[in-house]
Image (cartoon, rainbow, N blue to C red):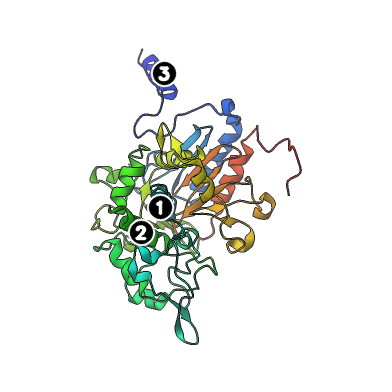
Amino acid sequence: MRNANRMLALCLLLAAPHARGEGLPAGKPELVGLSAARLARIGEAMKRSVDEGRLAGVVTLVARDGRVVHLEAYGKASEGTAGAMRTDSVFRIASMSKALTSVAAMMLVEDGKLLIGDPVSRYIPAFKNTTVADTAQGSVPAKRPITIRDLLTHTAGISYGGELTREKYHAAGFDDWYFADKPEPIGHWIEKLAGLPFDAQPGERYVYGYSTDILGYVVEKASGMSLDAFLRARLLQPLKLDDTHFFLPEQKRARLTTVYAAREAGGIEPAPDKGRNQGAYVDGPRASFSGGAGLLSTASDYARFLQMLLNGGELDGARLLSPKTVELMTSNHVGNLYSEGRFGFGLGFEITEHVGRSGRHGSVGEFGWGGAYFTKFWVDPQERLVVVFMAQLLPARGLDLQDKFRALVYQSLVTSAAWPPVARRP
């Protein structure tokens, strides 16, 4: 009788619509054009990497047509007997925060409070007269104002501290992308950053760095709310992303995964418990909301966010963006400035424009990004896929598991919008 009740409960869970905090609804692989047997190869590869000591633990998720067909946890989330990885384990997502902040900015565009062509100085006056590092003169004035679009596309010329700027950034108290330990609000740091030299002239190069943190402060200025409050009210609550936070509630502490480090000689170990290695995401001052790299989340929460984008800006009756805004965000804005033209870059996302040039499994129109702690996501509109990879490994020292995961996801498809081809693609 007990087993029968368990089976009934499981069936009801699989059949039920999304409940708060439970992610996208589950589905059978064969009903959405995937092979369950081929999907099982993902688990074999993940488990092999864990068993070989290359990774402590990982959560992988694949959804098609809005149904989760694969959600598995492997290995351990932390040391000790109670440290098994769970599908609802919480991860530091670092630069995967950028996608949510970019969406927040575009929501303000749709509110009529921003234009992507606006100068940043309209919202942060300290950016009115910026400078660029120069080997001969020390620094020179920027040729033009930095715009919101420059921030969204990482063409503002602002790094995390490049060859000519690193020493000055560190002297000013900047620790690459990490702000969780700062007792001051993010605006304090962005105002300070405006007075430092940048690495390139606006619009001339793709330079990855603090642009999305600046964008998060623009969101605060334009909305009159902290970035945390804006995201909760306009994005996290409408999408029911109950496990996505800048700083984790105390009662969720046990679900926060440990960051591991790959040793140069091989194997892994828990990263030292200092600074960004483990981070002040529970016990920190909870004051600085980093739009560029500050959020925590789960695979299921993040998949709901991605499904909203795949749906053209809507999920379960909550519309965050217009389909035309999603189209604008997922179009290449930078020409060949990013990745030597192998990929494009949109308003917050890497864009696949040509499968052959990309050199990997995927589709034209696919968009995605990753995070420093060894997390990754992508959305494939052509194949109607949402894919999330969550682990905590810093440094990863060249571990190729994310690349293998990508190939394993695509080999599991048995129906494809790309095959048979209706015409030869350019």
Circle nearer the N terminus (2, 1): 1
Pinpoint residue 36: horizontal percent, then vertical percent: 58, 30
Residue 73 visible from this viewpoint = no
Q: Nearer the viewer, residue 294 or 258?
A: 294
- Tags 2 and 1 touching, CB below 8 Å: yes
Residue 78 higher or lower than 30, as above or below = below
Question: What residue is rendered at 38% in x and 33% in y?
Answer: 22
Q: Which quarter of the figure is the N terminus placed in?
A: top left
Q: Which mark is residue 105?
A: 1
Of residue 174 and residue 43, the one placed in the foreground of this image is 174
Q: How many marks?
A: 3
Residue nearest the viewer, comparing 95 with 113:
113
Q: Is residue 107 left or right of residue 407?
A: left
Rate crowding at label 3 as few (under 14), some (14 to 19) or many (20 or more) other CA atoms within 10 Å: few
Q: Earlier in the sequence, mark 2 or mark 3?
A: 3
The residue where tag 3 is placed is 7
| Coordinates of residue 145 in the picture (x, y in percent) | 44, 70
In-front residue for pair 337/389: 337
Amino acid, disc 3? Met
Q: Residue at point 32% right, 39% down? A: 237
Residue furthest toward the front?
A: 112
Disc 3, disc 1: CB below 8 Å?
A: no
Q: CA distance from mark 2 to mark 3?
A: 50 Å
